[in-house]
Image: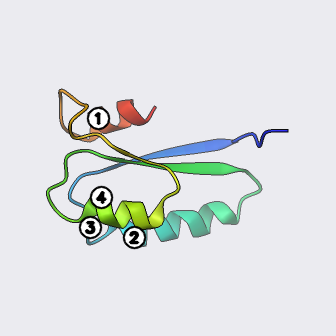
Amino acid sequence: MKNIIDFSLVLPVHNEEDIIEDVFTQIRKTLDKLSVSYEILLVENGSIDNSINVIKKLAKKYDHTHSLLAHKGYGSAIIRGL
């Protein structure tokens, strides 16, 4: 039987290497307290810093989209994540 995800969180990431680990950790701590299954999808959108390497370390699922999106920005990243 497959695990059913009750909650999906899409986080757009663009040049967030300094904060993404803290944000991700706090979100996981909060969601772990809830009685739901969840997934966190980090969608990287053309960062020029070290964000993608931080994401790879943190996430089971991530999307490196800089070459896939015609339009950069958080909105495009969220749409891609959805």
Q: Are dots 4 and 2 in contact, CB under 8 Å?
A: no
| Chain-order first, disc 1 or disc 4 | 4
> Which label was assigned to residue 21?
2
Q: Which type of secondary structure does the marked residue at label 4 adopt?
A: helix
| Chain-order first, disc 3 or disc 4 | 3
Judged left or right of residue 54, residue 4 is: right
Tell me which residue sits at (64%, 50%) in the image.
Answer: 38
Which amino acid type corresponds to the residue marked 1 in the rendered image? Gly
Tell me which residue sits at (37%, 37%) in the image.
Answer: 78
| Residue with the mark numbered 3 | 17
| Residue with the mark numbered 1 | 75
Q: Position of residue 64 (x, y in %)?
A: 32, 45
Depth check, mark 3 against mark 4: the one in front is 4
| Chain-order first, disc 1 or disc 2 | 2
Which amino acid type corresponds to the residue marked 4 in the rendered image? Ile
Badge 3 local density, few (<14 within 10 Å), some, or many (20+)? some
Quadrant position of residue 33:
bottom right
Q: Is residue 81 above or below residue 33?
A: above
Q: CA distance from mark 3 to mark 4?
A: 8 Å
| Chain-order first, disc 3 or disc 1 | 3
Tell me which residue sits at (73%, 51%) in the image.
Answer: 36
Q: Are dots 3 and 1 in contact, CB under 8 Å?
A: no
Q: CA distance from mark 3 to mark 1?
A: 19 Å
| Residue with the mark numbered 4 | 52
- Furthest-top residue in this view: 70
Depth check, mark 1 against mark 4: the one in front is 4
Which amino acid type corresponds to the residue marked 3 in the rendered image? Glu
Which amino acid type corresponds to the residue marked 2 in the rendered image? Glu
Badge 4 local density, few (<14 within 10 Å), some, or many (20+)? many
Q: Are dots 1 and 2 in contact, CB under 8 Å?
A: no
Q: Say how the picture is coloured.
A: rainbow
Q: CA distance from mark 4 to mark 2?
A: 11 Å
